[in-house]
Amino acid sequence: TPQGEAAATAASGLILERSRAAAGQAVEYEVRYVDYGDEASVVLDRGFAAERAARADTEGPFAGAKATWDPSNPNVLTLETPDGGLLEIKVTKRSFEAPS
């Protein structure tokens, strides 16, 4: 974390530990895209993808999490765990590449 591992909460420490253990292991989950703007534009449905990724990690702290995400504000994704824990992910820099 930017403030160092000592500043991480218990949940984020568990995520870090599990992430290190799972490094290099493939996880499969569904994703989908939604129409956005004109008829030719689509974006990844980050809420759907986050819920499916959490579901695929059945032992993780976010298993069964519900996502809140809006394509009109794509930089903010919030996950809520079944026990009420919250994780908010904010994108602060984004790049764009036009299809060739």
Image: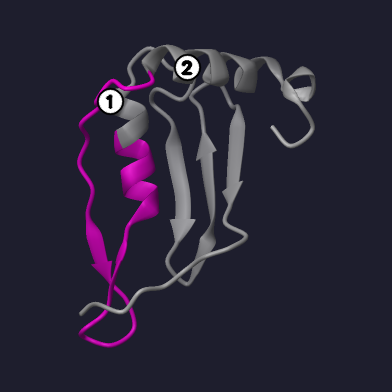
Q: Is residue 28 magenta?
A: yes
Query: Is 51 placed above or below 36 here?
Result: above
Q: Mark 1 falls on what kind of element?
A: helix
Q: Residues within 10 Å of mark 2 (few under 14, many from 20)?
A: few
Q: Is residue 6 left or right of residue 19?
A: right
Q: Is residue 46 magenta?
A: yes
Residue 76 locus on image (x, y percent): 56, 56
Q: Residue at x 33, y 34 (%)?
A: 53
Q: Mark 2 falls on what kind of element?
A: helix
Q: Which mark is residue 85?
A: none
- Foreground residue among 94 and 39: 94
Q: Which residue is mark 1?
A: 56
Q: Which residues are magenta?
A: 23-52
Say which amino acid is labelled 1.
Ala
Q: CA distance from mark 2 to mark 1?
A: 17 Å
Query: Is 47 placed above or below 96 here?
Result: above
Q: Which residue is mark 2?
A: 20
Q: Is residue 50 left or right of residue 89?
A: left
Q: Residue at x 74, y 37 (%)?
A: 2
| Image quarter of the N terminus | top right
| Image quarter of the C terminus | bottom left
